[in-house]
Image (cartoon, helix red, strand yellow):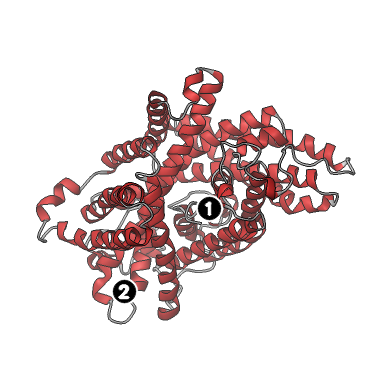
Amino acid sequence: FAAIAGAGPLVGPVLAAQWGWGPGFMWILLGSVFAGAVHDFIILFASVRHNGQSLAVIARREVGPVAGMTTSFAILFIIILAMAGLSIVIINALFNNPWGVFTIGLTIPIAILIGLWMFKISPGAIKTASIAGFLLVLGAVILGHWVMPGQQWAALAPYLSFSKKELAVILPTYGFFAATLPVWLLLAPRDYLSSYMKIGTIGLLAFGILVVQPAVNFPVMTRFMDGGGPIIPGPWWPYVFITIACGAISGFHALISSGTTPKMLQKESHARLIGYGSMLMEAFVGIMALIAAVVLVPGDYFAINSSAAAYAKIASYFPTEEIAQLSALVGMDVAHRPGGAVSLAVGMAHIFSSIGGMSHLMNYWYQFAIMFEALFILTTIDAGTRVARYILQDVLGTYIYAPLKETTWMPGSIFTSFVVSFSWGYLVYSGDISSIWPMFGVANQLLATIALALGTTIILKITTVKKYAFVTLVPCILLAITVITAGTMNTGMYFKMNSALGNINGTASVVLIILTGVILIDCARQWIRLWKTPKPEGMNTEIKDFCDYGKSQPTITP
């Protein structure tokens, strides 16, 4: 759960509120149960049976070499787009926000300190390190108030106020170092600390909603159902599905369900609770985020989540009511900060500050929510950039220069980390949320389509009851139709931009659709053959029972 619960379930539902609370709520509810959780569970099961191998390796073994190679390239493309989409969210939350930058900046040395504590200074002292890390992170939020204008450390504010372009350089630089440093030093302790923040904050938000019972100010559907919205310009179908993305189903989860998580299972039967259950928990996160968004007045929501020019076109339909008051309460101008993070933070702060005796703490709650969201995103950037580095090293080492395949070879690690960080950093530097988020959503959902197709192949291989395959085949087909439609619409929009970024985005969209099509065709050939085979042939793995797990490849420890 800590690994899959990134910014997607927080930001996606907030942006999808543009079409009203109804479409987003129904897709999160139905999509997570019938598609997302099924997706996570079947890939986790398959990876367990393949001794914890990656999605690309499973595709190569079960479908064929073409599918395996194509999946590797698709994953690499998708991770780069995901990093860009998530990074632009945090940039819109942190620009000209010295409090937020101070707090998030301190979480890096805090994570390194906790890593040194748990792994080098006092190995095994998890309880002490956990308490210390939690208190230090809270302290960073509180101390951040002192760097604001008029406070004790106001002299630091100019050095902590960054523009969007400056942050678009800082974040990829951070991603480069995070992907190069040892896992135990930054990635592991940051993920560990953030897991407590994630679970605790979502629990607190749920408690606040139950206590405050805020009014829902959004309609079930808005006037933008057919398109023309200031945040995402497309119609509700197919854009609700790719906008919500991780809140209902996420292809990124296939990367977590394979490779790493399978090595931590004690029993194969635990895959249902861990795979299926964690996705349901993420859907709960998505619904909480949607509620935090729709308690805002629609005019204030649109003013926060759209540019000044875009909002001016709809201001007569959705006038602001409390935006000036909200800005005063949180201590900074929250208008025209698109990306979902700021409106979510404002909504969360509004709910928290409505609890008895906390109305004067809204600025602290706001920055706490920003820190909470940023930790969600930074953990994904840490892991995603590193995974992309591994994949790039594997591809380059296999086809171009063999030493690059060794992840311990420092020159290769530095080179591939730079290539990956620069790739998504360029997209962030050149784009905005309205162009990058739909592209991220398409890429993410295409990977989910690939994983469901692979899951269908696996089910047909291991059972005589062929109709079981419909559990993954139906969502695979529906998702493929929806996402390819969205990708095609995006492609036309990008090429009409007549810019270098538009051409890059359009070309990337075409490549992703082609890669997905190749994999689906390859899988469909297998489905036709397997449907006609009465006797299950089993998966192409030597592990037939969980008691054999970890024995076939001694280099992989369960």
366 up-or-down from 310: above or below: below
What residue would you read off at disc 1?
246
Q: Is residue 310 left or right of residue 34?
A: left
Where is residue 176 shown, x and y percent of the image? 35, 35
Where is residue 27 shown, x and y percent of the image? 60, 60
335 or 446, nearer to the observer: 446
Residue 220 marker? none
Residue depicted at x 39% and y 68%: 296
Q: Is residue 347 left or right of residue 325?
A: right
Where is residue 213 shown, x and y percent of the image? 44, 79
Residue depicted at x 22% and y 52%: 102
Q: Is residue 306 visible?
A: no
- Disc 1 marks a residue whose amino acid type is Cys
Residue depicted at x 22% and y 56%: 99
- Disc 2 marks a residue whose amino acid type is Ser
What residue would you read off at disc 2?
353
Q: Earlier in the sequence, mark 2 or mark 1?
A: 1
Quadrant of residue 456 in the image? top right
Where is residue 326 shown, x and y percent of the image? 28, 67
Q: Extreme top residue here? A: 400
Q: Is residue 527 left or right of residue 483?
A: right
Q: Secondary structure at mark 2?
A: helix
Mark 1 nearby-residue class (10 Å; few <14, some 14–19, many ≥20): many
Q: Secondary structure at mark 1?
A: helix
Q: CA distance from mark 2 to mark 1?
A: 28 Å
Q: Is residue 540 left or right of residue 508?
A: right
